[in-house]
Each structure stands twice: as structure tokens, then as C-alpha cells.
Image (spheres, rainbow, N blue to C red):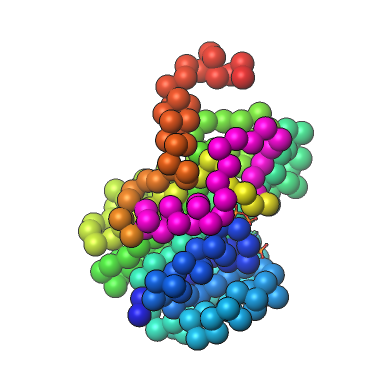
Amino acid sequence: MKKAIIIGTTSGIGKELATILVNNNYKVGITGRRNELLEEVKATNPEKFIINSFDCTTENNSEKLSELVSELGGLDLLIMSSGTGDENSNLDYKEDEKTVNLNVKAFTEIMDWTFNYFRKQGFVHITAISSVAGLRGSKYAPAYFASKAYQINFLESLRKIAKKPIYITDIRPGYVDTAMALGDNLFWVSSKEKAAKQIFSAIKNKKDVAYISKRWRLIAWALKIVPRFIYKRV
Ligand SMILES: NC(=O)c1ccc[n+]([C@@H]2O[C@H](COP(=O)([O-])OP(=O)(O)OC[C@H]3O[C@@H](n4cnc5c(N)ncnc54)[C@H](OP(=O)(O)O)[C@@H]3O)[C@@H](O)[C@H]2O)c1
């Protein structure tokens, strides 16, 4: 049986992925701050889930990951789904600090630990949920968009260091129907179920990058080519 850890399994995309993984013969370490929600996930398949409830911004993530890997008896796949960010055009630093602490600082610690663990082991699959938001700046949520750009570039860097069979999959959703779907004018919103199914397929196929849903690739392409003098007006 394969072993996985999902950081951020209490709700949303991470929770959906947890169900798919156990149905595909994985034992899964599940994390997040809200322990009662992790208990609910575990109750659906007690043999296959191991809980380790912690806040990535205040705990020692490396220690927590080591504990989980020992309990699981190894690790084949780590999925970083925890993320935070809100609209903050007023640039309230307290808000931005929360985003940076999770999406940048904790993200980096988790990637560094996992990559080095896998480098020693000789095989690895790291998957992280970044976002289409990481492709350009935003006047609504500057720190969130910048943190996602950081994640995208970090993952690309890991991919350059990694030698097969070490795989790094960057999942870039547009909008998914969860608490994190920011804004009022949402479009092409995927259900959590559809998003998780497409993410699992990207993991199985060892994709470098996957847009969720697939048609968000078009928006990504448009975002990349639109000239700066036009983009700054929208
Ligand atoms: N939904 C979208 O439209 C969308 C679009 C693009 C990218 N994404 C990305 O997808 C990822 C998953 O988000 P989601 O849509 O599934 O939203 P979600 O349901 O709000 O899930 C966020 C997860 O992050 C965890 N988390 C938040 N703060 C944490 C902390 N300090 N320490 C540990 N865990 C923490 C939450 O668990 P606790 O609160 O229990 O700690 C929860 O499990 C995020 O990285 C997000 O940026 C989402």
C-alpha cells in the first residue's frame, strides 16, 4: 500500500483528494488545524487515515512531517493543499502576514523537508496546489497572488534540481467551489469533486503542471501574453 500525506485535509480540495487516495489503495496522513474535521474524515475509513492536527504557521513543520512519516511507515506522495489569502486592496499588513506565513514561509519549510527526505530515499512525488493567480499581479489580493507566484517558481526550481524518479506536480486551479474561491465575479467554477478527480489524474500521469479545470489553460495563456500596458488598466 502506498503512503501519502495531505497538508490541509479538513476541507475543500485536500479533503476530496483524501477520499480519492484511500479509494486508490493509499494510507494517508491528514493534517489541518481543525481536529474535529479530521476526526470526521478518519471515521470514513479508520484503518487508512492517520491524523496529525497542527497549524503550519506556528508549529515545527519538519518535526510534524517526520512524526507522520514514521507513523505511516514511509512516504510516496506529499500534497500541499493548505493555503490562505483574502482580498486586501487596503494592504492591511496583519492580513498579508497570515498569507505570507502559510503560503510562503510554511510552504518553503514543507517543500525543503520533503524534497530532502525524498532525495535520500531516491524517489518522490511532491504535489502542491498553487493557482492561476500566480501568473500575474492583482489589485484585489496582492499578497495572495504574489505568494502563488512564489510557489510556482519554487516548484519549477525543484523540478530543475530533481532527477527522475523524483516528480514535482504544480496544480493551478482557476476557481473551485470552496471557501477559498475569492471574488464576486467567478466563472468556470469547478466542483471540489471534479477538481480532485482531475488533480489525481495529473498525479498519476506525473504531470509537471496541470490547470483545473483544463480549460483554465486558455486563461493562463491569455494572461501570459497580454501586454503590461493593457494588463495594468484592467
Ligand atoms: N478554491 C479556489 O478557487 C482555489 C483557486 C486556486 C487555488 N486554490 C488553492 O487551493 C488550496 C486549497 O484550498 P481550498 O480551495 O481547498 O480551500 P479550503 O477549503 O479553505 O482549504 C484550505 C485548507 O488549508 C488549511 N489551512 C489554512 N490555514 C492553515 C494553517 N495555518 N495551518 C495548516 N493548515 C491551514 C485549512 O485547514 P484548517 O483551517 O483546518 O487549518 C484547509 O484544510 C489553497 O492553497 C488555495 O490557495 C484554491
Q: Position of residue 83 (x, y in %)?
A: 59, 54
Of residues 26 and 54, the one drawn nearer to the viewer in this rendering: 26
Work out which quarter of the rendered image holds the N terminus and state it.
bottom left
> On the image, which quarter does residue 222 sit in?
top left
- Residue that extends furthest to the left in the rendered view of this protein: 164
Of residues 121 and 204, the one drawn nearer to the viewer in this rendering: 204
Q: Residue at x 49, y 57 (%)?
A: 196
Residue 191 lies left or right of residue 126; in this view the side is right
Q: Residue at x 44, y 78 (%)?
A: 27
Residue 172 lies left or right of residue 1; in this view the side is right
Residue 59 at least partly seen:
no
Residue 183 at least partly seen:
yes
In reply to whether residue 15 is colored magenta, the answer given is no
Asked if 114 appears above or below 49 in the picture, the reply is above
Q: Position of residue 54 (x, y in %)?
A: 63, 71
Asked if 4 appears above or below 109 in the picture, the reply is below
Q: Position of residue 39 (x, y in %)?
A: 65, 78
**In which quadrant of this rendering is ligand 1 seen?**
bottom right
Asked if 173 appears above or below 75 in the picture, the reply is above
Marker count (numbered): 0
Q: Position of residue 209 (x, y in %)?
A: 37, 46
> On the image, which quarter does residue 200 sit in?
bottom left
Q: Residue at x 42, y 22 (%)?
A: 225
Residue 2 lies left or right of residue 145; in this view the side is left
Asked if 152 appears above or below 91 in the picture, the reply is below
The span picked out in magenta is 180-203
Work out which quarter of the rendered image holds the C terminus and state it.
top right
Q: Residue at x 64, y 45 (%)?
A: 181
In reply to whether residue 188 is colored magenta, the answer given is yes
- Residue that extends furthest to the top in the rendered view of this protein: 229
